[in-house]
Amino acid sequence: MNPDHSRFAEWDAAYVLGALSASDRRDYEDHLAECAECTRAVGEVAPTVGLLSRVAAPPLTERDEEPDAAHRAQLVSIAGRRARRRRAWWVGASVAAAAIVVAAVAVPLTIENATQQGSVYALEDLANAPLEASVRLTDAAWGTQIDLVCRYSGEVLDAPEGGWPYALAVVDANGASTTLSTWRAEPGSTTQLSAGTDLGVGDIGAVEIRTITGERVLMRYEADR
């Protein structure tokens, strides 16, 4: 575990919600580059926050007050901690009604389940990154299942301990993006992960692999319109 983990252990929800100050955000992003546990925590909280942002709030009464970002972050952080404690119960559960993230495991680059439906698309390299990736988009009653396979072919000397952190994001037809999952890639590794979105296949504008901060798009599949 990263020695600074205890300081940042509860910052995941505040980071995703944008409730951190500029200096705290920079400190946390520097920490994410070195701490696999906090990177995983961000990936667990981000889908929940993305779904919450799509729920219309009821009209405020005179007695109601709009909760500030810090309070929202506290609520999501509590939910995230409870969710992580129940992770063992969730393993093997079906994806339903909301985006969920499962652990990344080493697999062949091609998605080989012949019985699985959906369409497979290659992601285009936008940043000369040492990555090769494809996604399968499978329509479901609750939205879309996204299965990503990504191979990292970078040099050992270029990668930090634990590998480079990446983020998987989905972009809707209006350009709004949601981070679905994060993972780390070591040289020569192939990673598969599954995630979900409440968007239908026809509502997805793009699927992207980004840097962990989300500021740079490395690879993209862009849907034909």
Image (cartoon, helix red, strand yellow):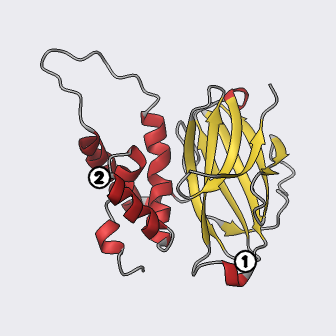
Residue 163's x, y, as percent? 62, 75
User: As rendered, which of 91 and 41 lies closer to the eye?
Assistant: 41
Q: Is residue 137 above or below residue 113?
A: above
Q: Amino acid at mark 1?
A: Pro
Helix, strand or loop status at disc 2: helix
Q: Give the farthest residue toward the front.
A: 23
Left or right: 121, with 146 as reference point: right
Q: Is residue 206 visible?
A: yes
**Marking on residue 78:** 2
Residue 103's x, y, as percent? 59, 63
Residue 80's x, y, as percent? 37, 53
For the residues bearing labels 2 and 1, Cβ distance under 8 angstroms: no
Q: Amino acid at mark 2?
A: Ile
Which quarter shows the N terminus?
Answer: bottom left
Mark 2: few, some, or many residues within 10 Å (few <14, many ≥20)? some
- The part of the image, by quadrant, that contains residue 120 is top right
Residue assigned mark 1: 187
Left or right: 120, with 200 as reference point: right
Nearest to N terminus: mark 2 or mark 1: 2
Which quarter shows the C terminus?
Answer: top right
Helix, strand or loop status at disc 1: loop
Residue 57's x, y, as percent? 34, 23
Mark nearest the camera among 2 and 1 is 1
**Marking on residue 26:** none
Residue at (41% x, 79% y) in the render = 2
Residue at (77% x, 38% y) in the render = 222
Residue at (31% x, 46% y) in the render = 73
